[in-house]
Image (cartoon, grey):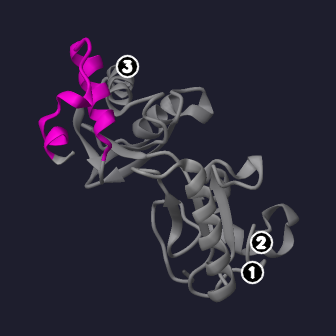
């Protein structure tokens, strides 16, 4: 971590380990597992651990962005001097190579990016500010503006697709993009996505009354 540089916020090499109740396990059980891992990581590896989301020990650590405030460089100083930045587990000192780590249980997160047809990163940052929850935007949406492959990108974490699904986020960005007089080049779901999110998108986009995951062929075959 002493030499690492990059665009994405981080406080450590691993940075974040989420426990997600995909199937056959509850969020509460994931909280228990996350604390078990935190104790192991802090005691065996001597890495400071911060708990977030459903596992958070404090309200100001529920949001991952709040835990990452100042990133590695800032936390490296504050962890030793600021009592409010003391980790939930482990030493109040950054690991020399691993930094710190955030662990917690959370709902399924959809990583979704929208690439604008412009190279002006300021527009991406402006739109990100309009749509993210903490600035009065869509509920459950975290968003940042980056430059990727030469084009402006709005990178999002949709932390609760039942509140704001990826199709709803797309339409909101499309609305703001038109106001800035730019188009959308493409969008991408980064990683896996729950079936229910796809079903919800179909129902809303096509007004498919009564449509459910029970009508998805593969789901019935694999049951």
* Quarter of the image with the N terminus in it: bottom right
Residue beneath the point at 17% across and 47% down: 222
Residues at circles 2 and 1 in contact by the CB criterion of under 8 Å: yes
Residues in magenta, as a range: 193-221
- The residue indicated by pointer 2 is 79
| Among the two numbered marks 2 and 1 on one chain, the one whose residue lies closer to the N terminus | 2
Could you classify mark 1 by the number of other residues whose Cα lies within 10 Å: few (under 14), some (14-19), or many (20 or more)? Answer: many
| Pointer 2 or 3: first along the chain | 2
Between the residue at mark 3 and the residue at mark 1, the CA separation in whole angstroms equals 46 Å
Secondary structure found at label 1: loop
Of the numbered discs 3 and 1, the one sitting upstream in the chain is 1
Nearer the viewer's eye, disc 3 or disc 1?
A: 1
Alpha carbon of mark 2 to alpha carbon of mark 1: how far?
Answer: 6 Å
- Find out whether residue 203 is within the magenta segment: yes
Q: On the image, numbered disc 3 is attached to which residue?
A: 179
Q: Could one spot residue 182 in this view of the protein? A: no
**Residue 117 drawn at (x, y percent):** 24, 37
Disc 2 secondary structure class: helix
Tell me if mark 2 has few (under 14), some (14-19) or many (20+) residues whose alpha carbon lies within 10 angstroms of its own.
some
Q: In the image, which disc is placed on residue 93?
A: 1
Q: Position of residue 103 (x, y in %)?
A: 59, 64
Please state if 211 lies on the left or on the right of 174 as rendered: left
**Viewer-proximal residue, 218 or 53?**
218
Taking the spot 63% from the left edge, 61% from the top edge, the residue there is 32
């Amino acid at each position: 971590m002493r030499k690492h540089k990059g665009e994405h916020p981080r406080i450590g090499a691993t940075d974040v380990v989420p426990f997600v109740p995909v199937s056959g396990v509850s969020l509460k059980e994931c909280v228990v597992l996350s604390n078990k891992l935190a104790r192991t990581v802090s005691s065996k590896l001597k890495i400071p651990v911060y708990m977030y989301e459903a596992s958070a020990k404090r309200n100001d650590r529920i949001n991952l962005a709040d835990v990452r405030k100042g990133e590695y460089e800032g936390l490296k100083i504050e962890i030793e001097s600021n009592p409010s930045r003391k980790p939930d587990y482990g030493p109040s000192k950054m690991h020399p190579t691993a930094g710190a780590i955030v662990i917690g249980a959370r709902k399924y997160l959809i990583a979704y990016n929208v690439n604008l047809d412009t190279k002006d990163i300021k527009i991406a940052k402006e739109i990100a500010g309009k749509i993210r929850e903490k600035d009065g935007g869509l509920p459950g949406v975290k968003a940042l503006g980056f430059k990727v492959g030469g084009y402006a990108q709005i990178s999002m974490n949709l932390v609760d697709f039942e509140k704001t699904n990826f199709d709803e986020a797309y339409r909101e960005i499309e609305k703001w993009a038109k106001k800035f007089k730019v188009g959308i080049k493409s969008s991408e779901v980064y990683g896996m996505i729950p079936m229910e999110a796809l079903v919800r998108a179909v129902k809303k986009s096509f007004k498919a009354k009564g449509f459910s995951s029970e009508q998805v062929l593969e789901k019935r075959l694999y049951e």
